[in-house]
Amino acid sequence: MSKSITGFSKLSKSHKIDWIVSTYFNNNPDTKNIIEQYWNSNFKLQQLHDEFIENTITNYYLPFGVAPNFLINGKMHAIPMAIEESSVVAAASKAAKFWSERGGFKAEVLSTTKIGQVHFMFHGDFKILQNYFKTVKPKLIEATKPITKNMEKRGGGIIDIELRDKTESLEGYYQLHATFETLDAMGANFINSCLEQFAKTFREEALVFSAFSKKEKNIEIIMSILSNYVPDCLVRAEVSCPVKDLTENPSINPEEFANKFLQAVRIAEVEPFRAVTHNKGIMNGIDAVVLATGNDFRAVEAGVHAYASRNGTYSSLTHAKIENGIFYFWIEIPLALGTVGGLTSLHPLVKLALELLHEPSAKELMQIVAVAGLAQNFGALRSLTTSGIQEGHMKMHLMNILNQFEATEEEKVTLIQYFKTHTATHSSVVQAIKNLRKK
Ligand code: MEV
C-alpha cells in the first residue's frame, strides 16, 4: 500500500486525521480519540495553536512547573520551567533555596552582540574585492534603513559589516560578516531581513562596479542567514560561600565535599564523555526556562554546545575554585534570547511565564536562564558526589511508574510510604504494585 499523499496540507484538520488513522492505524478508533483528547475546548485557543505550525492535528503537552526561591542579584524569582523529565524542577528548587540562604546568585551580561553572514563566491582579485567592499558598505547600510529604522530608534541596529576572506578553507569563498544589537528581540527576523537586503545590494552594485572584470562582477550569493553561534552574546552567573557553609548535612564534611565537587567539575573540563552529560544536566535547566518563555531552545542548544568546544575539545560550561576558604562556582554561556516578538506576545502561557518573571528585558532573562543552568548543575553534582543520582531520581520516577500502572490514590500513598525506606528501581516498583494488588 502506498503511504504517500499529495495535497496533505490542503486537507482540513479532520481529513488529515482520517487519512493518518486509516493509513497508519488501521482505522483504530482509539487513535482518533487520543488525538482529539488533546484538543482544547476553547476554539480560539485551539486555533492559535493550530496556526503556530503547519499540518497541526493536535497539541503536545509538556508539564509547566515553577521553581521558587531564586535570589538573583538581590531580587527573588519563581522560575517557570517547561520540561518532561522528573527531578529537574525539584533539583532546581532545592538548589535555589540552598543558595538563597548564602547570598543568592550573582549574574551579569558580558556582551549582547549577534551575528549574521552573507556567504558568497567570488573568483577574482581580492584587493579589488576589498576596494569594492569599501565603496559598497555605506550603501549596504543605507539600503537596510527601512528595516533598521525602528530598531535604531530604540538604540539597536547594525553594529558593523566586515568582508572576510575564507578562501583558505574553500576556494572562492568569502563572507559579509555582520554584527547586530537587537535589544529585547531575539532578532532572527531582523537579522535575516538585513542580510537578505545586504546580499541583494551587494550583488546589484557589483554589476556596475567599473574596476571589476566581467567575471568579477558576477558575485554568486550562496545564502544569507544569522548564526546561532553567539560567543559575543555572553552571560555569567556565579554563587559563592565559605567552604564551611557548603553542606547542611552534618554527616558530610564540607571540605571533603568541596574538594570532591571541584574534582567533578575538573573531570568535566578535561573529559568530553563526562562533559556532554555534565552539560546535558545544565541544559535541563536552561532549556526548560527557554521553552517556558517561548524562546528557541534549538538555537540555544546549538550555540551553547559550539561554545563548549571553542578551545578545540568539548568541555564543561561550569567552573569552580576554592580561594581563601571561599567556594566559587560559575557558568559562562552564550544565549540569544528575546522577551519581545516571536511567541512572547502570542502564546498565553509564554506571556504568563514572562509576567511571573516581572517582564524581564532580554538581558535579565539571559541572567535568569544562566542561573537555572548553574543551579541544575549544582544539584546534579551535589547528588552525584554524595548519595548518587538514582536515589532522588527514582523517588521522582516512582510517580511516573505508578501513573503508568494507573495506581489509585490509596495505592500511591502506600507505595510512596514504602519506598521511603526501600530502594526504588523500575522492577522493584512494579513488583511492589503487583504485591499490593495481590493482597
Ligand atoms: C540527567 O538528566 C542529568 C544528569 O545526568 C546530569 C549530570 O550527570 O551531571 C544527572
Image (cartoon, grey):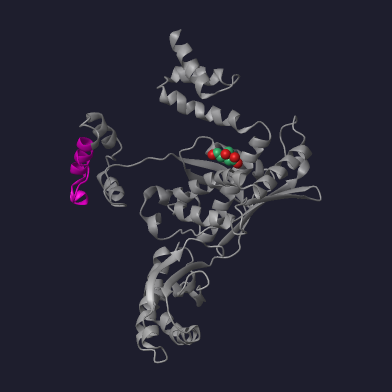
Q: Judge whether 66 appears above or below 177 on screen.
A: above
What segment is highlighted magenta in the picture?
A: 1-23
Foreground pick, 417 / 192: 192
Residue 84 is drawn in which quadrant? top left
Residue 357 position, x and y percent, is: 50, 51
Q: Nearer the viewer, residue 21 or 142?
A: 21
Residue 359 horizontal/vertical position (percent): 48, 55
Q: Is residue 14 left or right of residue 79?
A: left
Asked whether 265 falls inside the magenta stretch, the response is no
Extreme-front residue of the structure: 171
Magenta stretch secondary structure, dominant: helix
Residue 97 seen anywhere in this rendered image of the structure: no
Who is closer to the viewer here, 159 or 31? 31
- Image location of residue 252, percent across then percent down: 74, 32
Location of residue 269 with respect to 186 vertically, above or below: above
- Which residue is rendered at x = 54% and y = 52% of the image? 369
User: Ligand 1 shows up in which quadrant of the image?
Assistant: top right
Q: Nearer the viewer, residue 71 or 91?
A: 91
Residue 55 appears left or right of 244: left
Magenta span includes 11: yes
What residue occupies the far bottom of the structure in this picture? 210
- Judge whether residue 221 can be spotted in this image: yes
Left-right relation of 345 to 243: left
Looking at the rendering, which quadrant does residue 210 occupy?
bottom left
Q: x%, y% of residue 228?
A: 48, 60
The residue at the point 21 percent across, 43 percent down is 16
